[in-house]
Amino acid sequence: MSCVFGFDVGSRLLGVAVGNRFTGSARGLAAIPVRDGDPDWQKLDALRREWLPETLVVGLPLTLDGGEQPASRNARRLAEKLGQRYGLPIELTDERHSSQEAAQRFASARAAGLKKRRDAATIDAEAAAVILERWLASPPAATDR
């Protein structure tokens, strides 16, 4: 299996998506609560055991001109913790505009009356899917995927 996890790092929720290298597709899995900078590790551990990802892709929030910002440091910290905890390859990828794209994907659902809190969690998971789809579609870096 060629399963990959994608993450959209937020201060309150961590969007999680699962993707497939062969098909290049991804879908949102969950939005996991974040407390004091750490995700709910039990929930994340359970998803990892269920899906057995081979690589973890973390969205790196950059400024419009490509510079780092405080949220970039949070994403890098999480990537480091994920690497230490799971011993899997970690990839950081530019996530600019992923949340806006995810929100656009759910515009019709929101218009249909999804509750704000549930909608926010859905958008975070979908943003992780957008990040992962972009990474899957990008040419491989120096390391082989």
Image (cartoon, rainbow, N blue to C red):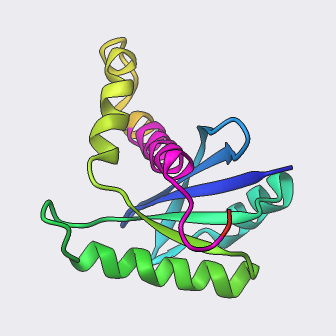
Q: Locate the C terminus and report the quarter of the image it occupies.
A: bottom right
Residue at image location 62% in from the left, 73% down from the top: 143
**Whole-percent x, y for residue 141 in the image:** 53, 67
**69 left or right, relative to 1:** left
Q: Which residues are magenta?
A: 120-143
Quarter holding residue 107: top left
- Would you say residue 36 is visible in this rendering? no
In the image shown, does 91 or 69 lie closer to the viewer?
Answer: 91
**17 left or right, relative to 111:** right
**Whole-percent x, y for residue 4 in the image:** 69, 55
**Whole-percent x, y for residue 51 in the image:** 81, 52
Q: Residue furthest top?
A: 112
62 above or below 100? below
In the image shown, does 92 or 125 lie closer to the viewer?
Answer: 92
34 above or below 113? below
Residue at image location 47% in from the left, 37% down from the top: 122
In the image shown, does 143 or 76 lie closer to the viewer?
Answer: 143
Magenta span includes 71: no
| Overall secondary structure of the magenta section | helix
- Would you say residue 37 is visible in this rendering? yes
In the image shown, does 114 or 132 lie closer to the viewer?
Answer: 132
Residue at image location 20% in from the left, 67% down from the top: 66
Quarter holding residue 108: top left
Magenta span includes 142: yes
133 above or below 63? above
Q: Residue furthest left?
A: 65
Q: What is the total number of numbered labels drawn onto the structure image?
A: 0
**Whole-percent x, y for residue 71 in the image:** 29, 73
